[in-house]
Image (cartoon, rainbow, N blue to C red):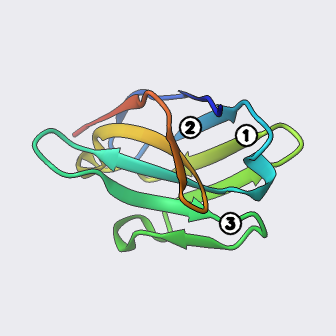
């Protein structure tokens, strides 16, 4: 069983920065694709960024150049550095681990950006 625990969310003014962390238990972390998703009220959950076990990354167009995903396999942790935050980034952010057909989700952390 894999457990994902997010931290680092909060309230920030537009233009500010936050760093999210996701600590994973279990032995699959090094092999899994790790991703961050977000869901705003009334909207679907969308991919924000993901990183493969080899370290390749992908980003949603809306966050390119502002957000950076990284992972530390020794610490079983994935990070999301969010800079130049905008009110449109307000959402619950979820950590996701994917390995083949297996999918795991964290409980989510709220990010609120005030204008």
Q: Nearer the viewer, mark 2 or mark 3?
A: 3
Residue 29 % position (x, y): 74, 47
- Residue 89 higher or lower than 49, as above or below: above
Residue 85 % position (x, y): 39, 49
The residue depicted at 80 percent of the width and 52 percent of the height is 30
Q: Which mark is residue 77?
A: 1
**29 horizontally vs 98: left or right:** right
- Residue 64 higher or lower than 76, as above or below: below
Residue 113 % position (x, y): 30, 37
Please report contact status of discs 3 and 1: CB closer than 8 Å, yes or no: no
Q: CA distance from mark 1 to mark 2?
A: 10 Å
Q: CA distance from mark 2 to mark 3?
A: 18 Å
Choose the circle earlier in sequence order: 1 or 2: 2
Q: Nearer the viewer, mark 1 or mark 2?
A: 1
Choose the circle earlier in sequence order: 2 or 3: 2
Instruction: Tell me the element at label 2.
Output: strand
- Residue 99 higher or lower than 106, as above or below: below
Question: Counting other residues with Cα less than 10 Å from the Cα at mark 3, is it few (<14), some (14-19), or many (20 or more)?
Answer: some
Report the quarter where the N terminus lies.
Answer: top right
Please report contact status of discs 2 and 3: CB closer than 8 Å, yes or no: no
**65 horizontally vs 63: left or right:** right
Residue matched to label 2:
20
The residue depicted at 44 percent of the width and 27 percent of the height is 107
**54 horizontally vs 24: left or right:** right
Report the quarter where the C terminus lies.
Answer: top left
Q: CA distance from mark 3 to mark 1?
A: 13 Å
Choose the circle earlier in sequence order: 3 or 1: 3
Q: Which mark is residue 52?
A: 3
């Amino acid at each position: 069983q894999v457990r994902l625990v997010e931290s680092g969310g909060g309230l920030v003014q537009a233009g500010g920065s936050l760093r999210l962390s996701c600590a994973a238990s279990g032995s699959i972390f090094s092999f899994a694709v790790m991703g961050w998703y977000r869901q705003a009220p009334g909207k679907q959950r969308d991919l924000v960024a993901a990183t493969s076990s080899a370290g390749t990354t992908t980003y949603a167009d809306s966050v390119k150049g502002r957000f950076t995903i990284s992972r530390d396999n020794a610490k079983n942790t994935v990070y999301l550095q969010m800079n130049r935050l905008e009110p449109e980034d307000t959402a619950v952010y979820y950590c996701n681990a994917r390995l083949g057909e297996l999918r795991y989700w964290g409980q989510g952390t709220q990010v609120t950006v005030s204008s």
